[in-house]
Image (tube, rainbow, N blue to C red):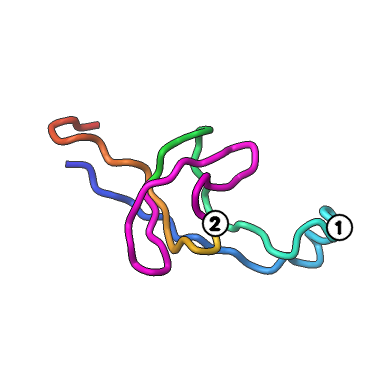
Amino acid sequence: MSEIKWIPVVIRPITDEEKEIYGDKYKTILDFKLPEYDLQEVLITLDSGAVTTDYYDEDWQELERYDWADVRAWAEMPKGYGYED
């Protein structure tokens, strides 16, 4: 059975070096591995502790239903029972 590998969501203040690149466009930056595919369904753990699914929008680097700020971690969907890597 495939093990779920949770990736913690880290949102940090933008550095001075990044401010030179992006200007005042951003105040924080996503500092974690993002999903690889557009409209990829992912598992997410919310700040409330609930586990649910959402879809990742690659163009906007955001989820469709939830905000990254409300997510503690995300993971790729596991393979179905009986399907191994």
Residue found at x 61% / y 45% = 61
As drawn, is 84 to the left or to the right of 29? left
Of badges 1 and 2, the one in the foreground is 2
Task: Please say whether residue 57 is one of the residues in the magenta stretch.
Answer: yes
Which mark, residue 36? none
Q: Quadrant of residue 41?
A: top left
The residue tagged 1 is 23
The residue tagged 2 is 67
Residue found at x 33% / y 41% = 77
Q: Quadrant of residue 67?
A: bottom right
Q: Amino acid at mark 1?
A: Gly
Disc 1 to disc 2: CB gap under 8 Å: no
Q: 46 or 74: nearer the eye?
A: 46
**Where 6 sits versus 81, above or below?**
below
Q: Residues within 10 Å of mark 1 (few under 14, many from 20)?
A: few
Q: Point out residue 35 in the picture as x, y percentages from the top left corner.
A: 49, 42
Residue found at x 63% / y 67% = 12
Q: Point out residue 6 in the picture as x, y percentages from the top left corner.
A: 36, 55
Q: Amino acid at mark 2?
A: Asp
- SS of the residue under disc 1: loop
Question: What segment is highlighted magenta in the picture?
Answer: 43-66
